């Protein structure tokens, strides 16, 4: 009887995860205000000017957080200061979106210092990638959609497609992507909620209260500047934690500027991923234009998508 009840509870939880409806913050409109803040690595205001000009060209007002220009070794000020900056922007009813200024490392140091009571009353978009994955994952556990897209410093070199995709996502249009075929793609079709972000950050929050549940969902991962053996190690740790057992599909973004040892690992990042996923039967898209690349297209995490992979290419459609 105990085994039966345990199986029933597991099935119920799995069904609940599949049925859950996340909350999309209100779409932006001209005249709205967005805030650029640094939750991780330090950044000077001058390097954010292209992002300010971009957002203003969309008819938005832009304010800078108090963390911009601050320095505490690598970080944009001490933890309390970055957390206070984030809290103020979360609580400010006039701010309709929060955009990360830069990635790096440091968001995980402040996530437990902030609360989301006022955010829940008036949700707003949280935008960024790389280390901002901590916030993406944490917000998913709370049931809110976020946007994996440009950070402030990446606006200068971003492609027009990347910038336009972020504008569409912020202003309420659903992104739709048609992609060329890739030799490693695995054919199939899946419809589910999209979760994920930077692989290293997802790995770092595993087992914490910021870990998003991937059961019954489509997983997106990307990474930059890691040793190839460490990509293998992270994926195997996730596998041993049954991370991929109930995933409905996987989208692989940029796996760029990887490092190797004097004795080569023998496989590139995509080959490492393909080898690990051999035993699973979900569809997989490789080389999706998102991550630490100029063409970093916006993805609405927490939203339902349909992914379809065939011989001619692949499609990703947001519901």
Image: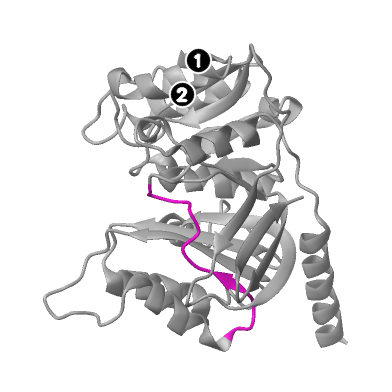
Magenta-drawn segment: 280-293
Residue 126 found in image quarter: top right
| 109, 196: nearer the viewer | 196
Q: Which residue is outermost to the front?
A: 312
Question: Does the stretch in magenta take in 158?
Answer: no
Label of residue 157 in the image:
none
First reached walking from the N terminus: tag 2 or tag 1: 2
With 176 as the anchor, is 159 left or right in this view?
Answer: left
Q: Residue at x 52, y 81 (%)?
A: 277
Q: Residue 75 location in percent, x, y?
A: 29, 34
Q: Residue 90 location in percent, x, y?
A: 59, 25
| 236, 305: nearer the viewer | 305
Q: Residue at x 39, y 78 (%)?
A: 271
| 165, 116: nearer the viewer | 165
- Contact, CB < 8 Å: mark 2 with mark 1? yes
Label of residue 62 in the image:
1
Position of residue 8 relative to residue 27, above or below, is below
Mark-to-mark CA distance, 2 and 1: 7 Å
Q: Which type of secondary structure does the marked residue at label 1 adopt?
A: strand
Q: Residue 60 location in percent, x, y?
A: 57, 15
Estimate how packed mark 2 is, as few (under 14), some (14 to 19) or many (20 or more) residues with alpha carbons within 10 Å. Answer: many
With 94 as the anchor, is 202 left or right in this view?
Answer: left
Which quarter of the rendered picture does the N terminus lie within? bottom right
* Camera sees residue 84: no
Residue 228 found in image quarter: bottom left
- Return the residue at label 2: 36
Q: Residue 261 location in percent, x, y?
A: 16, 73
With 107 as the anchor, is 300 left or right in this view?
Answer: right
Residue 49 found in image quarter: top left
């Amino acid at each position: 009887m105990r085994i039966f009840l345990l199986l029933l509870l597991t099935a119920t939880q799995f069904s609940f995860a599949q049925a859950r409806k996340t909350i999309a913050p209100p779409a932006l409109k001209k005249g709205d205000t967005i805030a650029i803040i640094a939750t991780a690595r330090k950044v000077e205001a001058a390097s954010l000017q292209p992002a300010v000009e971009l957002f203003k060209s969309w008819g938005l007002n832009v304010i800078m957080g108090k963390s911009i220009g601050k320095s505490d070794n690598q970080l944009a000020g001490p933890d309390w200061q970055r957390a206070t900056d984030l809290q103020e922007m979360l609580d400010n009813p006039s701010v309709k979106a929060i955009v990360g200024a830069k990635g790096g490392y440091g968001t995980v140091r402040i996530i437990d210092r902030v609360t989301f009571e006022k955010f829940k009353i008036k949700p707003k978009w949280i935008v960024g990638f790389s280390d901002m994955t901590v916030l993406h994952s944490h917000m998913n556990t709370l049931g809110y959609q976020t946007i994996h897209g440009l950070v402030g410093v990446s606006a200068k070199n971003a492609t027009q497609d990347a910038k336009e995709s972020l504008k569409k996502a912020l202003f309420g249009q659903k992104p739709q992507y048609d992609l060329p075929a890739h030799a490693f793609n695995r054919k199939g079709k899946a419809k589910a909620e999209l979760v994920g972000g930077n692989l290293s950050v997802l790995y770092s929050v595993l087992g914490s209260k910021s870990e998003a549940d991937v059961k019954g969902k489509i997983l997106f991962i990307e990474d930059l500047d890691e040793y190839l053996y460490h990509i293998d190690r992270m994926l195997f740790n996730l596998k041993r934690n049954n991370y991929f057992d109930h995933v409905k599909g996987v989208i692989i973004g940029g796996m760029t500027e990887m490092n190797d040892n004097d004795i080569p690992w023998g496989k590139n990042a995509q080959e490492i991923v393909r080898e690990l996923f051999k035993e699973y039967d979900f569809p997989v898209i490789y080389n999706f234009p998102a991550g630490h690349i100029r063409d970093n297209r916006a993805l609405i995490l927490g939203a339902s998508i349909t992914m379809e992979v065939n011989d001619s290419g692949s499609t990703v459609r947001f519901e």
